[in-house]
């Protein structure tokens, strides 16, 4: 749908935007992104949802003509995206901010928006579709967080610092009409401009239609807002830490499984064959057709030698086809182990292609099992997890910057003038032994290869300021403990006498 929408938006721009006399900002802004890329996003979304018609609709020929059925799927795109999102972010993760007052304000916003659960959901969508956006806004004097999936986000301008201009299309159906709301986030010099446009068309058409007043659907929404004191764009784009191998000039990310499409298709073929093995390989007993014919017994009652409703029995025609007196068991041996072995071989290949260690996923004939609890610091899964975490931590830092500038714009609260530091303590309990980490940091400090402050930051996931405070507390406790120990052993008894 959205590739068509993008092309229609381009049509609006070509028709209106290149005319110099038109002053509307959105009409003079081109979209450099290739709309062909959105076909890939649509495909990744379909695979994530478990049904992609080009793969899963099968046409086959039978004696009764051409038939159609749906291929069974292991739905590994969903499994891969969910597993990576769960490994990286959960309720044990902590977002630490060096300034205490700012930390309280931001954590209150996160709590009100149920950030932990929502972010994990959209992190999964990010790995499945190649990206997602968080867009803070103010409503009723409260900062709220809006989440946007990759198929509803079109970058308009970017540089090596990231995407800083975009349009967010939103389709609303009402009766026999289709409304398309375009929310533009653009820079005009040092001014940050948010512009809203509304188009209406027939429900059945793919056109944007004609432009109508915003008040048609949004009576309280302003057509244009200009902000002078923004330092960065009012949205944050998150994507997997993977190079875009499809369009190397695009700022958009790719799905975690984008380089493993052939393997995913083969996996579904193998799983479908495994499932069909029990349908096509069921027990069949061939009997002569004469054996299922109705026979009238001596009392005048109809009788059959075999139950005609039992699907085990297959009647084979009259003379010439088989011995009328011979019954044949035509049951074939099921290839269960061969199918399971083939599926597991493909799962190992898929793991390698998507950044997981070999053996991370296994098929036992009933379901796919995960083995992420057996991950070490040297494993491929752990290295991939850390790679994605680096990008996510940078994105969360940007998100807090956006929240602060929005809060300052609406006089809700402000950040410290001398700045602040954001660190994210990701939950590594699944992927590493905490005791081993403590022992490693202790050895580094003992051998003078690591400072005590850095070791505390690593073990507890604290910021530098928090680690300094903890070190001071430890030092004070050690002084008190030493004084008590001296008194306990009577070291200052003479002084008391």
Image (spheres, rainbow, N blue to C red):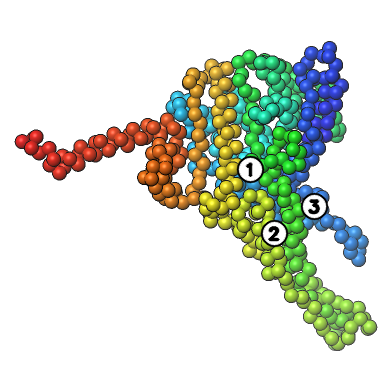
- Secondary structure of the residue carrying tag 2 is helix
Toward the right, the furthest residue is: 320
Q: In the rendered view, tell whether residue 79 sits above or below residue 31.
A: below
Which sits in the foreground, 264 or 437? Answer: 437
Residue at the (60%, 47%) spot, across then down: 384
Instruction: Give the mark, 1 or 2, whose residue is nearer the N terminus.
Output: 1
Residue at the (74%, 27%) spot, across then down: 156
Residue at the (69%, 16%) spot, across then down: 189
Q: Quadrant of the N terminus?
A: top right
Distance from the alpha carbon under mark 1 to that under mark 2 = 23 Å
Q: In the rendered view, tell whether residue 136 sits above or below residue 274.
A: above
Distance from the alpha carbon under mark 1 to that under mark 3 = 23 Å
Q: In the rendered view, tell whether residue 165 sits above or below residue 383.
A: above
Task: Please name the residue that numbered disc 2 is placed on.
Answer: 346
Task: Please name the residue that numbered disc 3 is placed on.
Answer: 55
- Secondary structure of the residue carrying tag 1 is helix
């Amino acid at each position: 749908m959205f590739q068509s929408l993008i092309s229609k938006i381009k049509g609006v721009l070509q028709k209106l935007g290149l005319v110099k006399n038109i002053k509307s900002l959105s009409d003079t802004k081109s979209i450099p992104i290739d709309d062909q890329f959105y076909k890939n996003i649509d495909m990744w979304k379909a695979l994530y949802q478990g049904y992609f018609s080009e793969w899963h609709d099968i046409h086959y020929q039978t004696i009764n003509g051409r038939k159609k059925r749906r291929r069974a799927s292991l739905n590994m795109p969903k499994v891969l995206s969910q597993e990576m999102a769960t490994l990286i972010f959960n309720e044990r993760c902590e977002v630490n901010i060096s300034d205490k007052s700012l930390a309280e304000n931001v954590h209150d916003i996160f709590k009100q928006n149920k950030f932990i659960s929502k972010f994990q959901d959209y992190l999964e969508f990010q790995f499945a579709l190649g990206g997602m956006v968080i867009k803070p806004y103010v409503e009723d004097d409260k900062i709220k967080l809006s989440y946007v999936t990759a198929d509803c986000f079109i970058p308009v301008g970017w540089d090596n610092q990231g995407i800083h201009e975009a349009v967010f299309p939103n389709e609303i159906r009402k009766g026999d009409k289709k409304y398309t709301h375009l929310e533009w986030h653009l820079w005009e010099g040092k001014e940050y401009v948010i512009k809203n446009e509304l188009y209406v068309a027939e429900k059945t058409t793919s056109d944007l239609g004609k432009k109508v007043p915003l008040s048609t659907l949004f009576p309280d929404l302003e057509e244009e807002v200009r902000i002078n004191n923004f330092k960065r764009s009012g949205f944050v784009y998150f994507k997997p830490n993977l190079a875009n191998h499809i369009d190397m000039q695009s700022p958009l990310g790719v799905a975690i499984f984008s380089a493993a499409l052939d393997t995913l298709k083969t996996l579904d073929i193998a799983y479908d064959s495994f499932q069909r093995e029990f349908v096509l390989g069921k027990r069949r007993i061939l009997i002569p057709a004469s054996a299922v014919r109705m026979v009238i017994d001596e009392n005048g009652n109809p009788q059959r030698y075999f139950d005609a409703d039992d699907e085990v029995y297959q009647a084979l025609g009259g003379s010439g086809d088989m011995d009328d007196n011979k019954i044949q068991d035509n049951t074939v041996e099921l290839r269960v182990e061969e199918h399971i072995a083939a599926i597991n071989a493909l799962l190992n290949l898929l793991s390698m292609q998507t950044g997981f260690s070999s053996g991370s996923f296994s098929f036992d004939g009933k379901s796919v099992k995960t083995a992420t609890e057996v991950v070490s610091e040297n494993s491929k899964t752990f290295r991939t997890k850390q790679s994605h975490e680096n990008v996510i931590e940078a994105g969360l830092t940007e998100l807090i910057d956006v929240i602060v500038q929005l809060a300052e714009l609406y006089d809700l609260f402000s950040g410290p003038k001398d700045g602040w530091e954001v660190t994210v303590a990701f939950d590594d309990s699944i992927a590493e032994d905490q005791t081993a980490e403590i022992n490693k940091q202790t050895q580094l400090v003992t051998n003078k290869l690591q400072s005590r402050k850095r070791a505390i930051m690593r073990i507890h996931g604290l910021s530098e300021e928090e680690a300094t405070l903890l070190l001071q507390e430890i030092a004070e406790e050690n002084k008190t403990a030493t004084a008590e120990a001296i008194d306990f052993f009577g070291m200052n008894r003479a002084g008391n006498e």
